[in-house]
Image (cartoon, coloured by chain):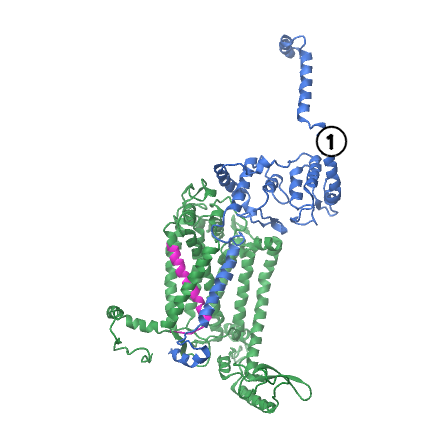
Amino acid sequence: MSLDTSKIADTNKDRPATAKKPNRAGAVAGWADDRLKLGTLTKVFARKVFPDHWSFMLGEIALWSFVVLLLTGTFLTLWFTPSMSESAYEGSYTQLRGVPMSDAYASTLHISFDVRGGLLMRQMHHWSAMLFIAAMFVHMMRTFVTGAFRKPRELNWVIGSVLLLLGILEGFAGYSLPDDLLSGTGLRIADGLVKATPVVGTYMSFFLFGGEFPGDVIIPRLYIIHVLLIPGLLLALIGAHMLLLVFHKHTQWAGPGRTEQNVVGYPMLPVYAAKAGGFFFMVFGVTALMGALLSINPIWKYGPYDPSKVTAGSQPDWYMGIAEGLLRIMPNWETHIWGITISWNVMIPGQIIPFVLFGMIIGWPFLEQWVTGDKREHHLLQRPRNAPTRTAFLAAMVTVYGLLWAAGGNDILATHFHWSLNSITYFMRVAIFVIPPIVFYVTRRWCIGLQRQDNDRLLHGYETGIIMRSAEGGYTERHLPISEASAYTLTARNRDEIHQIESDVDENGVAAPDTRVARIRAKLSRGMFADNVQKPTAEELEEARHHAEHEHELETGLDHPAAGHEFDDHQLRDAGDVPLRQH
Amino acid sequence: MRLLNRPLGRLSRHRRGPVAGLLVVVLGLLLTGGLYAALSPASAQTDNSAKLIKQGHQLFLVGCSFCHGTNGQGVKTLDGNQLGPSLVGVGAAAVDFQVGTGRMPAVQPGPQIPQKEVTYTPDEISALAAYVASLGPGPAIPNPSDYSLNGLSDQQLQEMIAKGGQIFLTNCTACHNFEGSGGAMPKGGFAPKIRGVDPKYIFEAMLTGPQAMDTFSNGNLSVDEKRDIVAYLQSLQDNPDYGGFGMGGIGPVSEGLFAWIVGIGSLVGVAIWIAAHTARSTTRKDSEVEDTQHEWEKAEHR
């Protein structure tokens, strides 16, 4: 890695930079550099180049939300009491005065009504938790749909997936802490999920809650998980995630000058430091605005938790909505054998399907790599349309998620749209199997259609909007070639190779041994890539160019100002020397 | 028999004076007549209520009898379903609630009769109520003093609200939601929103258990406890939204939608904005800068 640094500073690796005028800041920096070798570090990080695209900043939303979470969370710990011992409330929220409640709930009320800025901090903390996980989802979708998880970034994909899972657990632990009616109901569901484990479920539940639900240890336990264990893991994994990002360098979109060997963009200092720093303040600002203006988790209205109570509209936070939806649409299946009940109705939606879905997401890069056999490094991103099966898979998964979230809010749908609760459940039971495949098919064909359109643009140029009338009276639209840069960008992708097995019979014409896996691979490869439209070959492009030139020759002389437009800007320009649009 | 009767007979022979029998008869008559005079409606009133009942019956025959039968006995459809239930014993309170809130007369049978504009005038409603009340004994329209919160001291009101909140969270939130925003019931039914409803109707609903709702009779929840609930609902209405805009008061579903639409929506917008405003070393227009930009733009080699 040799950089030409002469433009930036009068220095190199051996010789420290000399300031033209000695100043105090320089003296401090020199002092620190002598002891901490900051110069070397800064050289690596400050001049790290990042490409510019809005979709590369989605992960940053999650990162900055995490910072907001740490800041507001620390504030909350100063007053929160993670204890389930009960006493009568004597605080300033009159509606609950005299009501027996746990210290956890009472201290949350205290934070909300008696600590200056406490409610704002609580609401900011909760909103930024929602945004943290939502941003991770969006970031993950971008990574997925552009193929940014391909070698060498598979591990970072796994780390990111684990971060998402940890974030969801952290969120669940967090909103269970106030010990209000809603969070207690959520814990009751968690208790049910644990108990649905065959044979050992009840034991596990008793270990978790220190006896029969709700017990008096779950909140202190969740607290330490929420403020120490998971945040520690999150911090470590975020650190690893970002170190790998720096180490691998950022991916970039294809384009002139952008190759698999370089990154084109702006350096960390000053450009990205300013952009990312500014983005932090924007994230903080949006969270602060939401925390100040939008009520979230008004625990004083829910009241303290009491296992005998429940409220209509009990839902988990959005990221647990998928589990809620699965539970709500699951048929009531149970098996009784030898005095043991196997609760398929809770085990399948609560313990199996979420992890199957998660496994599909985390495993896709490895499946794709196995099918393609592609072990090359990829630093140029794929446009979503150029991986139709993958894009369609994501669309189907998003649909599954959306449907399950809707199923989790079936009571809200029922009351707001005057639908029957039962009908929604029956509909969802079918829809969850029918709609995602439809979405998959439509998205896939849509992507392939877009690929065709790209090829049309390459071979026939873009539609100018100029309608030509031939001498015979026929109408055609004039096409003009797209710019070299656009053509480069469109063609900067690899052709898909379809894996085929050489022969599935051996020399004697008998089914060959050990070809089953290869056959599956070949089948998957065909399914995933056979329908894709490949970019035109060099000959085809050359031929198209000749054709365009020939056409241009035929059309020269036909251009003249349209009648009535001789003097305005709508004159037909000579398309030969001035392209109508920059494409 | 004689042996048994003797001591009693002797005792009563000792107690009985010569005019005792007469006195008992006179006293009995006086008591009966007096009680009748004191407790029975005055004759003029009787006329009036009979008139009211008759008027109510006329209205009933036009507006209600199609489903409830000409005598309020209820109507069954041919396949054995109940078209309209029997109204014998539902009481005046039920009529006042159903008709007074515009639920009755219903447009069509269904899983739940929705609220509409009120069809009848208050006089007509009381006539209907009088007629239905005459079909059999049932809860009467409550007195305003049962549910009114007027004239209570702050201290009293606060105690009522705290108590009412507990009763509300125990008995009502399961269907009507923690803020009284309403909730879903099976097969297209729903527990309606009860925030901002006239206290009289809250009280009557608890008393009569309209449609799918349970009945909370006065033996179940006393009049005072019902009033506590009214006080709590009123306080939900009066309290400011401490946390800001409540987004419909329906819990985490709307919170999730706002997180995605407002939160992620605006932050992605910010990301697009930041990415669109790329580094510029001069104040000249973008088109002119294009060349100088490449000097800034760096390529790092892998």
Mark 1, residues whose alpha carbon is within 10 Å: few (<14), some, or many (≥20)? few
Q: Nearer the viewer, residue A155 or A372?
A: A155
State whether the magenta stretch is mostly helix, strand or loop: helix
- Helix, strand or loop status at disc 1: helix
What chain is colored green?
Answer: A
Tell me if B152 is positioned left or right of A77 in this view: right
Q: Which residue is mark 1?
A: B47
Hey, which residue is sitting farthest front in the picture? A567
Q: Chain of mark 1?
A: B
Is A68 in the magenta?
yes
The image position of residue B108, as x and y in percent, is 70, 50
- Magenta residues, start to end: A49-74
Tell me if residue B84 comes above or below residue B19 in the rendering.
Answer: below
Q: Nearer the viewer, residue A149 or B139?
A: B139
Which corner quadrant holds the N terminus of chain A? bottom left
Is B97 in the magenta?
no
Tell me if A48 is positioned left or right of A315 in this view: left
What chain is colored blue?
Answer: B
